[in-house]
Image (cartoon, rainbow, N blue to C red):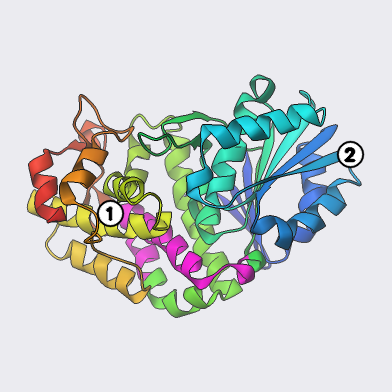
Amino acid sequence: MTSGVTQGRSRTIDAGPYEVRISAGLSSEFASIISTVARAHCYAVITDDQVGPLHGGALMGELSKQGRASLHVMPAGEAHKNRDTWARLTDELLDVGCGRDTTVVALGGGVVGDLAGFVAATFMRGVPFVQCPTSLLAMIDASVGGKTGVDTAVGKNLVGAFHNPTVVLADVELLTTLPVEHRRAGLAEAIKHGVIADAGHFAELSEALPALVAGDPTATLDAVARSVEIKCSVVKADAQEHGLRKTLNFGHTIGHAIEHVSGYALLHGECVAIGMVLEARLAERLGIADEGTADRIQRILTRAQLPVARPESLGAEEVVAATRLDKKARSGTAEYALPVRIGEMANAESGWSIAVADAAVLEVLA
């Protein structure tokens, strides 16, 4: 567990090279914090066309008092997290005169954070950036860990870079504007953290599920803070994903494949929910997981009203073929992070991932 500082209903979590600050109402302080920890001549705020109208104006108004600020808007959705959008945003920064004395600010969900981070990682060979996540999934997972990137026609997140934010600023009150289906989808990543590292967190999420779906700020802050602690402890131990960090991929090998094959018709968290159930069933079939592990995961996801089975419109063989294109595949074989039971992952001695034959994966997909 990483160190955390509780101040009233605020939490500050040590992520190693940066801090994650979580509280209700923090957005009123975004500009002053950014100008203190990531002081710049230019502030380039990257957001999307859903979050921008809700929260972009207030941030731009305050940042403009700290220096020159520009707003850059991308279309919402995973389908736009690509090299074309990256190129357009990079050109926009050049057009408005941004230079090496620029801080990029990501204001949005996981798609915005991934893409804005990649812009920051590559612009002028790397400039500082700040994560201001506005979705539950981004607060719990996507904004933390330093992974940035874009998708390609072949697969998800295949072009990118490790580039840590200067700070992550999460205001749980912003989630009141989040559609309920996005809150549900964000919970999938929190449940994943419970499965891979903390059975107690898994139980607490199950108990608090109605409040979390409703967006209760207190329950949400606690869930976000514990999930961030878990992810930070893993990332600090293995920043470049050579070992322990692979456990964070639980549910993602099949999940990313379903997301890609569906043309991103499903939310990322929905795909991860399906992936967790199927990968847990795979672990049981292989004799790795305790019997009943997949059922426990399925029950909590079903209560959160998340999907738990492969959509019938997606062919099992097509999904398996997509897993082989995953960035975690080696020698054409997909590797999986698999649980032993809730709170414990398998294969610590051999790098935390397991190569699994396509035939076994097809059995659970069928």
Where is residue 153 shown, x and y percent of the image?
39, 35
Front-lying residue, 102 or 295: 102
Residue in the picture at 62% in, 58% down: 134
User: Where in the figure is residue 296, as x and y percent of width and height?
Assistant: 23, 68
- Alpha-carbon span between mark 2 and mark 1: 44 Å
Q: Residue placed at 62% from the left, 64% from the top?
A: 172
Contact (Cβ within 8 Å) of mark 2 with mark 1: no
Whether the magenta-drawn stretch holds residue 109 is answered as: no
Residue at left offset 45%, top offset 47%: 231
In the rendered image, the vertical position of residue 265 relative to residue 200, given as above or below: above
Predominant SS along the magenta part: helix
**Residue nearest the viewer, comparing 189 with 159:** 159
Q: How many C-alpha atoms fall within 10 Å of the one at disc 1: few (<14), some, or many (≥20)?
A: many
Residue 111 on image: x %, y %: 53, 47
Of mark 2 and mark 1, the one earlier in the sequence is 2
Report if residue 261 is visible in the image.
yes
Region of the chain picked out in magenta, as a range: 175-203
> Does 170 sit left or right of 35 as displayed?
left
- Looking at the rendered structure, the secondary structure element under dot 2 is loop
Q: Amino acid at mark 1?
A: Gly
The image position of residue 297, as x and y in percent, is 26, 65
Pointer 1: what residue? Answer: 275
* Amino acid type of the residue that numbered disc 2 sits on in the rendered structure: Gly
Residue at 53 percent across and 37 percent down: it is 146
Q: Quadrant of the C terminus?
A: bottom left
Q: Would you name the residue on which mark 2 appears?
A: 67
Quarter-wise, where is residue 57 in the image? bottom right
Q: Secondary structure at mark 1?
A: helix
